[in-house]
Structures are given as C-alpha cells and as structure tokens.
Amino acid sequence: MSNQFPARPELQSGSWHFGIVASEYNRDYVDGLVNFAKDELLTIAPKSEISIVRVPGSFEIPIGVQRLIENRIMDAVLGFGVIFDGETMHAELIAGAVTTALMNLSLQHHTPILHEVLVVKNDQQANERCLLPNINRGIEAARAAVRILNALKSLGKE
C-alpha cells in the first residue's frame, strides 16, 4: 500500500458537474468513500454540482456510469465500490471486468472516470481506505478528478 497521498489542488473558481456512481453492496464503506469525495470536491470546487447514482453492486457500476454520461453532461465521474477478496476468484473477476469497462467508457466518451472500486482483504483495510481520512480513496479520487480536468483543459479539452 502506498502511503503517499496527493496534495489538495488549488481552489477552483469554475463550476463542473461531477457524477458519482456508488455500489449499495458494502454500503457503510462505500458511503465513506462517497461522503469524503463529496466534501473534498465541494472544498476544492465549491461551485460544482454533484449527482449521485446508486447501483446494486460493483459489477453494475459501469452501466450506471454509462447511463449517467449518456443522459447528462458530466465533466468527470467517480465510481465507488468495495469488494472483499475471498477464497474464490469472484473478486478478481469482478474487479477486472469493472476496470476494463470503466477504462473503455472513459475513452469512448472522452470523460474522465475515476476508478475507486477497491478490492480489500479485511475490515481493517476497508476502514483505512474508506472511513478514515489519512489514505481515504474518496478524497484521492476527488483530487484526481480535479487534476485530470485541469490537465485536459490545458490540452484544449474542456
């Protein structure tokens, strides 16, 4: 696990529309990601709008992202889910499929999609990454969303 955490970007004066697609499965942990991400986005880009969509599980996140992008103008979408790695290959299969689908959607729609579907081994890992601020992946995704939007803007993509 990396202990490096990206610094908070400068306060943004413009307004963006962020989407969050979040799994209902392992909801306590996912809610931690969503809440930390929302707070961070509104701190960095206070004029922005955030739309939240809930889907049953991590496997359904890509279809939720796709529908959100196709039906609304989104500057970036954050996908949040938590998968516990068990004794079968299920977690690996779900995580791989979601990763590929989200990357394909991002490239197809020219929209940044921040992938925070976490595969964790135990409750301690989930707590550290979802419910505590030090290495919270919701905060990390929010900061990365703002950074990629600024990078794309500098390259001529608004």
Image (cartoon, rainbow, N blue to C red):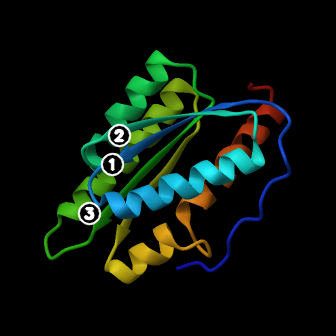
Location of residue 45 (image quadrant): top right
Q: Vertical placement of 80 versus 155: above or below?
A: below
Location of residue 62 (image quadrant): top left
Sequence-earlier tag: 1 or 3: 1
Give the Cα distance between marks 1 and 2: 6 Å
Quadrant for the C terminus, please.
Answer: top right
Density class for disc 3 (Cα within 10 Å; few <14, some 14-19, many ≥20) is some
User: Which numbered disc, 1 or 3, marks the residue closer to the eye?
Assistant: 1
User: Which numbered disc, 3 or 2, marks the residue closer to the eye?
Assistant: 2
What residue is pinned by disc 3?
92
> In the rendered structure, which amino acid carries the disc numbered 1?
Ser
Outermost residue on the top side: it is 71
Q: Residue at x 26, y 46 (%)?
A: 59
Sequence-earlier tag: 3 or 2: 2
Q: Vertical placement of 32 versus 57: above or below?
A: below
Q: Is residue 19 left or right of residue 83?
A: right
> Which label sits on residue 23?
1
Residue 33, image x, y percentages: 49, 58
Tell me, yes or no, whether the two marked residues, 1 and 2, touch with CB atoms within 8 Å.
Answer: yes
Q: Residue at x 83, y 41 (%)?
A: 12
Mark 2 residue element:
strand
What residue is pinned by disc 2?
54
Density class for disc 1 (Cα within 10 Å; few <14, some 14-19, many ≥20) is many
Sequence-earlier tag: 1 or 2: 1
Give the Cα distance between marks 1 and 3: 17 Å
> Which label sits on residue 47?
none
Q: Vertical placement of 65 versus 99: above or below?
A: above
Mark 1 residue element:
strand
Q: Vertical placement of 117 versus 4: above or below?
A: above
Mark 3 residue element:
helix
Foreground of the two, 52 or 88 = 52
